[in-house]
């Protein structure tokens, strides 16, 4: 592989000795660092966190901070909360006094990470990558302290490798090793094209760790193959192999699929405060606890204590969700904007005549009998039978009872009396409230 002197000459700041720091005890650091970790490599006999604990203890005794790396290819201009899981973990190390490296993969973005892809990514231009990189920096500094963050570009060393250097780097892996990677193996078996340059991607990401002398690299569980290459190349270069800390993929608002703008279940970090707060209030209670773990700085021990209070009836789950929505919204806006968003959300439900902590019911839009047929010449908009909806939510025992209650003027939709038969999905809204007599629910739609 390229010799380490070449990498060192390009990353002088990576090996400069910082002033000694007084770190928290190792156990206290681990409480925050391991929160939400799916896997830590290498695992030790007693615990997967033991190797990380040993590295932290060495750092604490010497007063020298660990170098924590996470790489991001600027392939799109905007980030959503799912992207911030790794950035948040960088912040945890930063809060504890360690050196965090926000690595912008401006060279690796020319290839595009093949992880999870069944075809070759279309290439980006240098201009597109640079524009996206600038927007990334603007967005990540809503979480990271810009004065304490080492921002690097892997073009600093990868573009200088030259042909001989790339040949040496490519010689560190075999074709059979690359085909061990599941997405490459699946494409090979399906006789789908795999471009040679795609196989360079894991090696280039691994060489980043050599150039930066990273002690810990962060990545998603889908990145394991790439992350392990860094350990291999560091070992070959005579460096101590980095610890790999992986986080799970975050589910979107539906609580099922990976957060993705294309799936319509994402919360963009540039969204207005009111919209962000409202979306967070729409998640189910189980997903709320995952968001507390992955999207906040609260130590896991405190989250567990809060959940115990909810289980014991000492804290209402709605209040826990409000606290979460406020905390995340304030992170990306201001505390005042988060306060305003919370007030706006509460006012919205007061106007609908429904208490904020009303029971939420999940209803599938494909439920049998819910959708009214479109008659010839009628509106193409999706029409929903309200009597059926009342039955599905449990407010009425049958559609017959629901129809009678509608005729008796005992049904309200979104705070207004309802006397018809059906409404469009747009008229009902994203989280409609229904009331029959003294009973009320709030509806959460799923596909």
Image (spheres, rainbow, N blue to C red):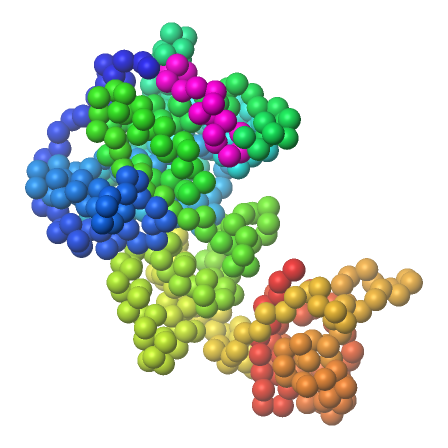
Q: Residue at the bottom extreme?
A: 408
Dominant secondary structure of the residues highlighted in magenta in the image:
helix
Instruction: Please give left or right for residue 179 compared with residue 237 in the image.
Output: right
The residue under the point 58% across, 83% down is: 440
Viewer-proximal residue, 440 or 162? 162
Quadrant assignment, res 240: top left
Residue 45: image x %, image y %?
23, 46
Quadrant assignment, res 106: top left
User: Is residue 360 in view from this perspective?
Assistant: yes
Q: Residue at the top extreme?
A: 164
Viewer-proximal residue, 195 or 314? 195
The residue under the point 36% across, 32% down is: 228
Residue 148: image x %, image y %?
23, 39
Task: Examine the structure image and report whether residue 237 is included in the region drawn in magenta.
Answer: no
Residue 144 against residue 114 in the figure, above or below: below
Residue 115 against residue 433 in the figure, above or below: above
Q: Which residues are magenta?
A: 169-184
Task: Examine the structure image and report whether residue 174 is included in the region drawn in magenta.
Answer: yes
The residue under the point 13% across, 40% down is: 59
Instruction: Please give left or right for residue 177 compared with residue 425 in the image.
Output: left
Q: Residue at the right extreme?
A: 376
Residue 392: image x %, image y %?
67, 76
Viewer-proximal residue, 273 or 205? 205
- Is the N terminus in the top left, top right, bottom left or bottom right quadrant? top left
Residue 147: image x %, image y %?
24, 39
User: Is residue 141 in view from this perspective?
Assistant: no
Instruction: Please give left or right for residue 356 compared with residue 212 in the image.
Output: right
């Amino acid at each position: 592989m390229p010799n380490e002197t070449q990498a060192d000459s390009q990353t002088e700041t990576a090996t400069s000795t910082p002033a000694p720091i007084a770190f928290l005890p190792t156990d206290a650091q681990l409480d925050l660092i391991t929160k939400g970790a799916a896997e830590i490599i290498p695992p030790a006999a007693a615990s997967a966190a033991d190797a990380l604990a040993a590295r932290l203890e060495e750092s604490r005794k010497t007063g020298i901070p660990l170098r924590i790396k996470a790489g991001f290819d600027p392939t799109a201009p905007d980030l959503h909360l799912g992207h911030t899981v790794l950035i948040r973990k960088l912040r945890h190390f930063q809060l504890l006094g360690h050196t965090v490296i926000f690595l912008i993969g401006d060279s690796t973005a020319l290839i595009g990470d093949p992880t999870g892809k069944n075809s070759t990514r279309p290439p980006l231009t240098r201009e597109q990558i640079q524009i996206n990189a600038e927007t990334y920096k603007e967005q990540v500094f809503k979480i990271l302290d810009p004065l304490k963050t080492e921002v690097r570009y892997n073009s600093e060393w990868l573009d200088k490798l030259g042909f001989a250097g790339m040949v040496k780097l490519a010689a560190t892996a075999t074709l059979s090793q690359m085909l061990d990677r599941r997405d490459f193996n699946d494409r090979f078996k399906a006789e789908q094209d795999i471009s040679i340059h795609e196989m360079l991607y894991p090696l280039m990401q691994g060489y980043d760790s050599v150039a930066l002398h990273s002690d810990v690299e962060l990545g998603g569980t889908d990145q394991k193959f790439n992350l392990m290459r860094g350990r291999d190349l560091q070992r070959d270069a005579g460096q101590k192999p980095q610890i790999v800390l992986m986080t799970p993929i975050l589910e979107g608002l539906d609580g099922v699929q990976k957060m993705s703008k294309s799936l319509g279940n994402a919360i963009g970090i540039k969204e207005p405060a009111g919209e962000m707060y409202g979306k967070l209030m729409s998640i189910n209670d189980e997903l709320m606890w995952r968001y507390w773990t992955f999207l906040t700085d609260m130590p896991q021990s405190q989250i567990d204590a809060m959940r115990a209070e909810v289980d014991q009836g000492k804290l209402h789950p709605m209040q826990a969700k409000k606290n979460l929505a406020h905390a995340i919204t304030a992170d990306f806006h201001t505390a005042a904007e988060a306060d305003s968003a919370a007030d706006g959300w509460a006012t919205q439900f007061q106007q609908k005549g429904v208490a904020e902590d009303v029971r939420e019911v999940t209803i599938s839009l494909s439920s049998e009998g819910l959708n009214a047929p479109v008659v010839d010449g009628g509106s193409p908009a999706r029409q929903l039978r309200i009597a059926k909806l009342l039955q599905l939510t449990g407010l009425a025992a049958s559609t017959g009872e629901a129809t009678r209650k509608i005729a008796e003027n005992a049904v309200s939709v979104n705070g207004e009396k309802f006397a018809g038969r059906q409404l469009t999905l747009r008229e009902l809204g994203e989280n409609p409230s229904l009331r029959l007599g003294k009973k009320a629910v709030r509806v959460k739609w799923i596909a």
